[in-house]
Image (cartoon, rainbow, N blue to C red):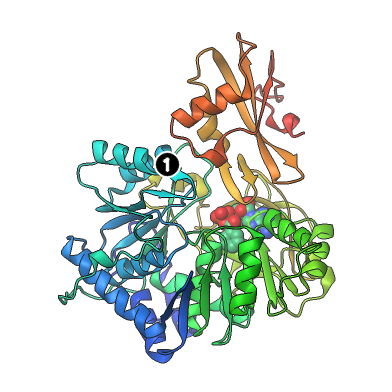
Amino acid sequence: MTNSETATWSIEEQKKYLELGYWHKLSIGAELNNWCKCYSNNIAIISGNKKLTYQQLNQQVELLAAGFYHLKVRPNDRVLLQLPNCIGFIISFFALIRLGALPILAMPSQRQQDIHALCKLAEPKLYIVPNRFLGTHYQPLIDDITTHFANTRVINIDNEQDPDFTLSQYYHSTPFTVSEPHYLDPAILLLSGGTTGTPKLIPRTHADYCYNARAMAEICKIDSNSVYLNVLPIAHNFSLSCPGLLGVLSKGGCVVLSKTTSFDEGFNLIKQHKVTITALVPPLAQLWANAREWDDTDITSLKLIQIGGSRLEASIAKQIKQAMHCQLQQVFGTAEGLICCTRLDDSDEVIFNTQGRPISPHDQVLIVDENDQPLKVGATGEMITKGPYTIHGYYRATEQNKTSFTKDNYYRMGDLVKFTSTGNVIVEGRIKEQINRAGEKIAAAEIEQKLIEYPSIESCAVVPVKDSRLGERSCAFIISSNKQITLSDVRNFLKQQGIAFYKLPDQLEHLTKWPLTSVGKIDKRSFLL
Ligand code: OOB
């Protein structure tokens, strides 16, 4: 019996994915145990001057799982994990999974507004958070949670005393017993990029998430000699399982954690640990490639650079490949499931100009018009999808699920896409009201709902604007009797409301009236500068 709170795959689909070997009848905790036994003396994780073998990783996961059990964490309990790239994240993540508890993977950049909403939605038993990291102080978030959520216990890690957040003070040696989770139970709750005012949680199951990671590991030819540099936040699906941490561990490779996204740190880690693969968002990849003009650190071990999360221009893809002297892979994916990517042996033509194709032969992808009618190959329309690792519904979100999925359980990506004659996809735009700021997603609705509370703002619209550095920046258009309101007024106001830094508008424009569509709605398209 599974305990999924959302719709799941049909019995026929389940049978098929098991027979094809896509799904294993194992929890992620059991998979980790097998990997650790198989590769016991290989180095699994490197962070700063700490190295963990697979065997040590498994032991520490077991000790922390016992520690969490001692703190009364039980199967199916939620635990909010908001840690940067550090060993503590990895051990906590696997320890919770081993207990059958569900880690909610918040990003270090998220602030009070999101964290509060997540606690309300998922009622976590624990909230694991540092006191500060890279100039961010988490105390206001901690105070908010302690005040409003009596059932959520805060585990606050002091970065001064424990720069790698190892959580060893919580390790416990008394054995515990919990029943093994079903392979189709939710294993983790990922955060959705979001199109609404409140965050949505993506329940990924043990079997589907491991398949996603393994399929990507195979496409990227990961083996026990692979060294993966983890630059992006480890809580993101791209760096967690595409192939990321899980894909690399499934093949006995090594994951090197980078604390920052800077090329100084990145290039040095590549040189020091002979990194073979890394994953970046387009603006970062461009920065790193530009730095190669004067930086001569030896990065010749690097074989593959994956780029995804937002649009990559063909001309920039070409520049990056030339500057980094390695293969490039475009990745167009979503935390809800579907991942498309170019393959290592594709031509430059395909790699530079397309976002590749689905990773599973059983991904079902349709390009449809406004009435969900499939279009012919080459036409641009909305991409909808279902398959062996795409969700059928968000966690505790009955209303939202009615609009985010079609009647026959396809997930609506919200992206405008076309297929080329070679079967690769090209992302042409999107219909969801979202700003993709350097790979970080901002729901226009969330910022609009807050802005309207600003004294004297009568109405507002937040839209993406093309930006040479970020890909897109966010621009707030407002109608207000007070023409003196400035960008910094608006940003300060939103910051006080607990809105994350990356979601603050980059630009402010005053209007006196809205351009309207023929049906009288605000015509957001006319703002797209
Ligand atoms: C990744 O996942 P999310 O969930 O943060 O965002 C998904 C959305 C897509 O629907 C699309 O709008 C956009 O991000 N996107 C891209 C893209 N990759 C993602 N738009 C244009 N070109 C691309 N290559 O962003 C994600 C998850 C796993 C792997 C890679 C990215």
Which residue in the structure is indicated by mark 1?
A: 114
Is residue 457 shown above or below 462? above
Q: 26 and 418: which one is in front?
A: 26
| Quadrant that contains the C terminus | top right
Q: Position of residue 13 (x, y in %)?
A: 46, 73
**Is residue 133 or residue 36 the one in the foreground?**
133
Q: Is residue 190 above or below residue 502?
A: below
Query: In the image, what residue occupies the spot 51% across and 34% down?
Result: 446
Amino acid at the residue labelled 1: Asp
Q: Is residue 94 left or right of residue 241?
A: left
Give the residue displayed 83% in from the left and 64% down from the top: 318
Residue farthest top in this picture: 481
- The residue positioned 63% from the left and 69% from the top of the image is 268
User: What x and y, as percent, mark residue 444?
Assistant: 57, 35
The yes-or-no answer for disc 1 within 8 Å of ligand 1 is no
- Judged left or right of residue 174, residue 349 is right
Does the image show residue 55? Answer: yes
Q: Position of residue 485 (x, y in %)?
A: 61, 16
Q: Is residue 185 visible?
A: no
Front residue of this view, candidates 459 and 391: 459
